[in-house]
Each structure stands twice: as structure tokens, then as C-alpha cells.
Image (cartoon, helix red, strand yellow):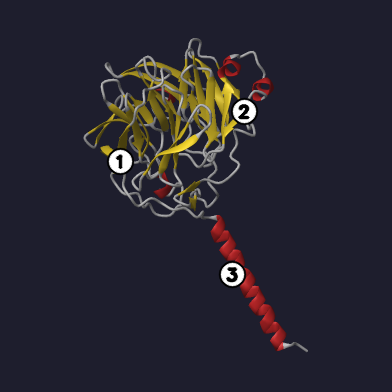
Amino acid sequence: MINKKHTRSLSLLTLLSAMMTTTCVAAEDQLPVQLPTQQDSRLQQVETSPRVWNGVTVSADGRIFASLTQSEGTGLQLAEVKNGQLEAWPDKAWNQWDSKDPSHHFLHVNALRFGPDGDLWVMDAGNKGIGTGDKAVEGGAKLVRINIQTRKVVASYLFRAPTLKPASYLDDVRFNGDFAYITDPGAVGLVVLNLKNGQSWRVLDNHPLSIDHQPIYADGKKLFLRDGREKRVGLDQLEVSPDGKWLYYQAIPGPMARIETRYLNDATLTAEEVARHTQKFVETWSTGGTAIDADGNLYASDINTRSVKRITPQGDVSTVIQDPRLVWIDAMWISEGQLWMPSAQINRTPATTGGKPSVVEYPVKLYRLSLPVAPSPRDHQ
């Protein structure tokens, strides 16, 4: 005989259990975070863009260039920014993908910066995204050097197997003399490029300090790919110390690690030997972008608290600025006395919200903060 009272009790317990499970899942998707409400009067809006950008760089004479993420659909990828208008660079043809001629057309520009030579260097990821199932395109993955006076491509380094893996997404680049270091969060590793002879090789593949150990949070919310999977991004940000001794690097959610560049530059060392020299440096946070100044201070955005933090060479952390307008500060740039911060709002795009409709507030903004800083010699002549 069925005891109806007992059955009701079990039903109530089942319902309570389900509610608790739902609450736990929801809690895992969010972090308690206090977003800023007070604007900082030091923050200056410099430029705007009708498309989402994920990095800016500024020439010695003040010209602003931006890389434009394709998180809201295909379109212009590399542009000079003038009074809120975007001019295709080096021309429209380079910004139109052609699979028959991948080495002379951008597939997916993900980063840019001025090198010590004064030229504009552009990183084409060679893949449409991380974790999307797309395969890297040989010839599409490339580091392109452009003279901004002539608008001519003066060099192009193409990446092929075995440096380029099927899942590769060549993300960002930093320079150190004859070498360039390139993060690959798609295949999770670091690419070293000898700029003199064009030789490249991989190190730190799937190393414990390269992979992502935790989810990415922005404004207190966990990020998800369009198909509903957690967005995970391994080895992504990197900076070279002003003296060229150290490479700092991290997955988006941290921690930050470092390694002496002499181990990276020696192509005769095995990957295992290189991996032995990595060091955990600082417990960091979900970071959109970084920069480094002439004194070796690192600047890392905190996309969860809308702030930018400073990390000294000794590993001490302090907050430089926190402001409600700093929504996903991505790849930053330092010029004399200025920290440039593009607000990318990537956490408001379908690419990070599980495919939900975009809530990006256009135009996106570029901000500047006056600081007693000077650029690293690794970035400027």
C-alpha cells in the first residue's frame, strides 16, 4: 500500500534537491563582484569605432591603428582610426579574404603593434576562432610587417606545419632582438620565430603553466561559446622585460608565469629542456590584455572588475584605475606618459555569451590615462 504522506514528502525533497542543484549551477556561472559606479576623472576618451576592436597601437607621431575582432561577423580587420572612422590598412584587398591567395589576404587579424623598427606588425591568427572546430590555414597564419609611410608590406612570415598545428590560432606577438614570440592558445603553446632566417619552432606546448585551469569571468559572469560550452583560452598574453631577459606569459584566467628568453632563443634545446625553466610568477585574474613599461612594470586588465592593475618586477600588485567604462580592456599600448586602453566589450558579444544577441554599446571606445610611464625599448626605437 502506498503511503500518500510519505510520497508527498519524497516529492518535496526531490523538488528541494532540484532547486538546490539549479542554484548551485547558477552560482558556478557567476562570481560575486562589485562593479564600479564612479567614473575616474583622469580617464580620457580618445577615439571611437563602429566595430568591436581587440587591440590598438600608436605610432611615434600619434597615428592610431586597431585590430578588429570578428566576434560580431566578418568585415574590416585592420584599420587606421581617424575621428571615429576606420580606414582599411594597408588597403581594402588585404582586408578581403581569398583562400586562393592566403598569404596576401587577412583571414583573421588578432593583434598588431609597432615594432622597434617603427613598422606596423600585424598578427594573422590563421584561424577563425579558438575552439570553433575550424582548422588553421597554412599561409593564412602569418606575421606581416608594414611600412606606414609607404603602406607597403615589407616582410611576411608564413607559418606551416609542424609549427602550425590543425587547432592553432596565432594570437599575439612580442619582439626581442632577432626573435619574436607568438602565443598559440588554439593549440596551447608558444611559437618562437627567428626574424633573421625565418625559422620557427614550438615550446611550452600544453605545459601546466600554459593551459587554462579555470573558467573566464567578465563582469562576474562566466563566458560561453556559441554552442554553449565554456569558453576556455590557454596561453594568450605575453610581454618581454625591457632588458630582454624575461618573457612573461599567461592563459587568460592566469596565473602569470615567466621564463628566461635565453632558453626560448636556443633552437637546439628540446621542448622538455625549455619547459624545465618555467616559473610561476603571480596569481592573476581573468585578463583581457597587457602592456609593459620601461621600468618593467606590467599592466594587466581585470575584465571581471573593470580595472587595470600594475604588477611590479618583484610581483607586487596594485590597482591603477577602476572605472565603469572599462568594459573588457583588451591589448593595451604605452607611449610616453600615456596608457592606451581599448574597451572591447567582447563579453557582450554572441561569441562569449553562448550565442545570445549582442548587447554591445556602440560605438566602442578607446581611452587614455596619463601616467609617469615610458614605453619599453622592446616596443620602440
Residue lying furthest left: 83
Does residue 7 appear to the left or right of 335 in the view shown?
right
Q: Which residue is mark 1?
A: 365
Can you name the residue that lies furthest to the right here? 1
Residue type highlighted by circle 3: Met
Q: Is residue 59 above or below residue 214?
A: above
- 356 shown above or below 300: below
Residue 306 higher or lower than 17, as above or below = above
Q: How many marks?
A: 3
Residue positioned 26% across, 24% down in the render: 62
Query: In the rendered image, which residue does mark 3 sit on?
Result: 19
Question: Percent x, y for residue 131?
Answer: 54, 41
For the residue labelled by badge 1, is the local secondary structure a helix, a strand or a loop?
strand
Q: Quadrant of residue 72?
A: top left
Q: Which residue lies under the disc numbered 2?
A: 279
Q: Is residue 271 left or right of residue 122?
A: right
Please say if the residues under marks 3 and 2 sit with CB atoms less than 8 Å apart.
no
